[in-house]
Amino acid sequence: MSEGDRHEASTRTFLARAAEVARLLDLEVAANVPENRRARHLAGVARRPLLERATLSEEFFDPLMAAAVYDPDPSFCRWFVEPALYAFGRRRVMTALLGYLRTGTTAEIAGAQRAWYCAHLPLRADRSPAYAPSGSRDPALDEVDDLVGRWLESSSTQHPAPINVIAVSQGDTTKPETLVARGPWRNSSGLRGNP
């Protein structure tokens, strides 16, 4: 499969996931939106109604997670992750993403990694009515310390980060005396960076 074919298949898959979320919200697809922009249009149209709801029924969870994972743009997968965080809790969202990381296809694993970053958004009472009227919620919904550890373990065993080995020598560059391993590090949230 060529790169163009993979991109087209990925775009169709994302469109199907975004269309399912829009269907659950009873949103119409604008007929004048070009097909190559339809998925992003649906995501944009769905964003506000998703955040404005105090609750989302159970049937929303899997489609929201699938849309977040299949969204090819890491800047926009937040549009599906954020309402899921408010409605279902950080713990459940991260558990679903961990499932994609452990058992998903290559595309799903990459999507879960993009969505994992968004799953760390701060939750604010003024952002969504999904908070209780008093502006509080059950802390157990957002307790994820153990999940972060499992994410780190799974991501390091399934997809080890590349390590660059740098030879440091004293004079003779053909006989390195010290090897220094350098590579991406992971912070406590499981996010990668460079030292």
Image (cartoon, rainbow, N blue to C red):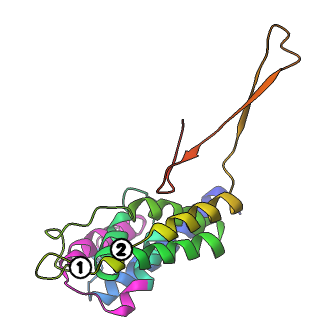
**Would residue 42 appear left or right of 172 to someone viewing this image?**
left
Residue 133 versus residue 152 in the image, above or below: below
Kind of element beneath mark 2 = helix
The answer to whether any part of residue 5 appears in the image is no
Instruction: Name the residue at the left extreme.
Output: 134
Q: Quick one: 67 or 1, which is closer to the camera?
A: 67
Instruction: Kindly check if marks 1 and 2 are in contact, taking CB atoms under 8 A apart as contact.
Output: yes
On whether residue 58 falls in the magenta region, the answer is yes
Q: How many marks?
A: 2
Q: What's the amino acid at mark 1? A: Arg
The answer to whether any part of residue 119 appears in the image is yes
On whether residue 23 falls in the magenta region, the answer is no
**Would residue 189 appear left or right of 28 to someone viewing this image?**
right
Q: Quick one: 122 or 64, which is closer to the camera?
A: 122
x, y (%) of residue 123?
Answer: 26, 67
Q: Earlier in the sequence, mark 1 or mark 2?
A: 1
Q: Residues within 10 Å of mark 2 (few under 14, many from 20)?
A: some
Instruction: Name the residue at the top extreme.
Output: 171
The residue that label 1 is drawn on is 137
Kind of element beneath mark 1 = loop
Residue at 79% x, 16% y is 169
| Residue stretch rendered in magenta on the structure | 32-61
Q: Quadrant of the N terminus?
A: bottom right
